[in-house]
Image (spheres, grey):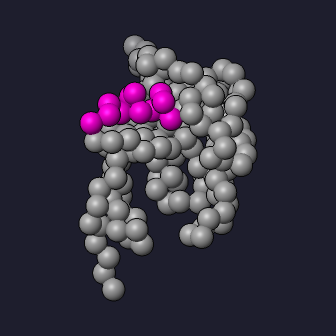
Amino acid sequence: MQWTCSMIKYSIECWLYNDLQDRFLLLRCPVTHRHDEYWQPVTGGRNAEEPCVEACLREVEEETGVKLAVEMLETVIPEFCFCIPEARIELRKPVYLARVRSEKVVLSSEHIGYYWFDATEVESHLHWDSNKESFRQVLAFTRRQFAPAPSSPSR
């Protein structure tokens, strides 16, 4: 049976990244009737009128206790869209990166744990394909930021 997405849901996704340690924060989500426990970055819903940046700052603080300034957010994917067939929902969200130096987290009751994973380990811990895809783009983004400038040919 072919599923179509009949509803659009707006959200945000934010990857907290300690660039000194090359580690990303993942949050542990609890078991529900739909799935087992799994790891994911900060995510959260927003209404269509709520500015994405404001929703991101709010969700990061709600889920981790981390207060970010607007200037700390880097847009990696302006609009990441995918369908969740079993829920018949199309999810639309920007994907942000926020570089942080402190790994202190105050976990919300929405999650059951957190861990700062080395960049090389993150993808293997992600459950959802959409998170794996966005993480690949986030990781590539961080690597481009620090790539050495090409040297000019000597004469």
What residue is shown at x 66% (from left), y 63% (from top)?
Answer: 31
On the rendered image, what quadrant is the C terminus found in? top left
For the residue pair 81 and 4, the one nearer the viewer reads as 4
What residue is shown at x 59% (from left), y 49% (from top)?
Answer: 40
> Which stretch is magenta?
49-59
Q: Position of residue 113 (x, y in %)?
A: 73, 46
| Residue found at the very far bottom of the displayed protein | 1
What residue is shown at x 57% (from left), y 44% (from top)?
Answer: 41
Q: Is residue 60 visible?
A: yes
Q: Position of residue 20 (x, y in %)?
A: 67, 23
Q: How many marks?
A: 0
For the residue pair 147 and 72, the one nearer the viewer reads as 72
Q: Please say if 72 is above or below 97.
A: above
Q: Position of residue 23 (x, y in %)?
A: 67, 35
Q: Position of residue 126 (x, y in %)?
A: 60, 55
What residue is shown at x 46% (from left), y 56% (from top)?
Answer: 130
Magenta-span inclusion, residue 51: yes
Q: Is residue 139 visible?
A: no
Magenta-span inclusion, residue 29: no
User: What secondary structure characterizes most of the magenta part?
Assistant: helix
| Residue found at the very far front of the displayed protein | 109
| Quarter of the figure with residue 12 | top left
Q: Please say if 135 is above or below 154.
A: below
Q: Is residue 112 left or right of residue 68?
A: right
On the rendered image, what quadrant is the N terminus found in? bottom left
